Amino acid sequence: MARDRSVILRVVQNMFLHVFLMTVAVACLFPLFWMVRSSLMSKAAIFTDHGLIPRDPHWGSYATAWVKGDFGIYFLNSVLYTVCVVMGIVIIGSLAAFAFSRLRFPGRNILFTLFVAAMMIPLPGSFVPLFVLMSKLHLANTRLGYVLCMINVGLSFSILLLKTFFDKMPTDLEDAARIDGCSRLQIWWHVALPLARPALAVIVVYNALNVWNEYILATLLLSDKSLMPLQRVLMVFNGAYQVDYPILMAGLTMTALPIIGLYLLMQRYLVKGIFSGAVVG
C-alpha cells in the first residue's frame, strides 16, 4: 500500500513538473511566434486581427525589409564580425586558459585575478576607454578596431570557463601526449581542445549572441554606415512618428534566424557544457 502511494506521488510530481516546464517553454517561445505572426500581416490588420494565425498572410514584408534596409550589406557585416570575434576569442581564450591552468610562471594568479575582475566592469563602462584607445591606435571606424573591441569584451568569461575546464582535465592524457613527442601547443591542439568541446560550444553561442545583437558600441566606434552590423537595419524601420510593424517584425525574424540556427546546431554540446564542471571528456 505504501509502495503504491509512493508511485502515485511520484507520478503526480512528474506531471506537475512537466506541466511547469511546458508552461515555461510556451512563455519563452510565444514572443518568437508572435513576431513571425506579425511579420505575415498587413499594417492595417496587425491592430485588428487578433487571431493566432493570420487570415491573409503577406510574405512581401520580408522582401521589403531586405531591400528597404539594405539587409544584405549589414547581414554580411554581422556574419564577418561574428565569425572573426568568435574565432579570436576561442583561440586567444583557450591559449590563455591553457597557460593559466598548466604553466607555472611569476604573476600567474595576479594576471588571472585581473581577468576575472574585468568581468565586474559593466559593458557600457568600457566604451569610453575602448573608443579612446582605438582612436589613438587609428583603428576607430575600422572593421579591425570593432573586432578587437568585441574580442576584449568576451575574453574574460571565456578564459574563466576554459581554465576551470582545463583544471579538471586528467594529467595522464597530457603525460601520454608528451611521451609521444607532443609539444605544449600540440597538446593544446590535439588533447585540450577536443576535450573542451562542450565548454567551447558555450563560448561560441554566448559570444556569437553578444556580437550579433550588439549595437551601442558599433554606433560609438563606427561612423561609416557601410561598416555597421545588422542591428542598424532595424533602426531604419523606426520612423520619427510611426513604426512599420510588419516590416520591422520581418527584419527581426530574419535577424533572429541565424542565431537560433546556431543554437540548435550547438545544442547537444551546449547542454553538456553547462554541466562540464562535473565530468571532463
Image: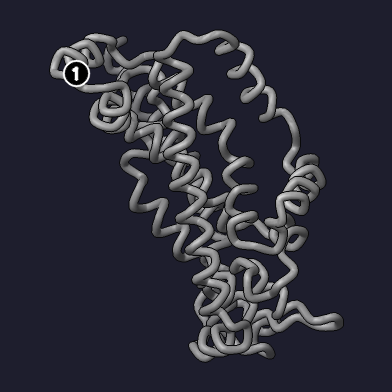
Three-letter amino acid code of the residue under disc 1 = Ala
* Quadrant position of the C terminus in the picture: top left
In the rendered image, which residue does mark 1 sit on? 177
Q: Position of residue 89 (x, y in %)?
A: 49, 41
The residue sitting at 66% across, 21% down in the picture is: 114
Q: Judge whether 135 appears above or below 188 on screen.
A: below
Relative to 179, 73 lies left or right:
right
Q: Position of residue 272 (x, y in %)?
A: 35, 32
Q: Position of residue 62 (x, y in %)?
A: 52, 84
The 10 Å Cα crowd at callout 1, few under 14, some 14 to 19, many 20 or more, is some
Relative to 278, 210 lies left or right:
right
Where on the picture, by quarter, is residue 173?
top left
Q: Position of residue 91 (x, y in %)?
A: 42, 38
The residue sitting at 55% across, 77% down in the picture is: 73
Please indicate, yes or no, whether residue 56 appears anywhere in the rendered image.
no
Relative to 171, 30 lies left or right:
right
Q: Coloring scheme of the render? A: one colour
Where on the picture, by quarter, is residue 241?
bottom right
Q: Secondary structure at mark 1?
A: helix
Q: Residue furthest left?
A: 180
Where on the picture, by quarter, is residue 201?
top left
* Quadrant position of the N terminus in the picture: top left
Q: Nearer the viewer, residue 141 or 47?
A: 141
Q: Nearer the viewer, residue 249 or 204?
A: 204
Q: Judge whether 62 appears above or below 107 on screen.
A: below
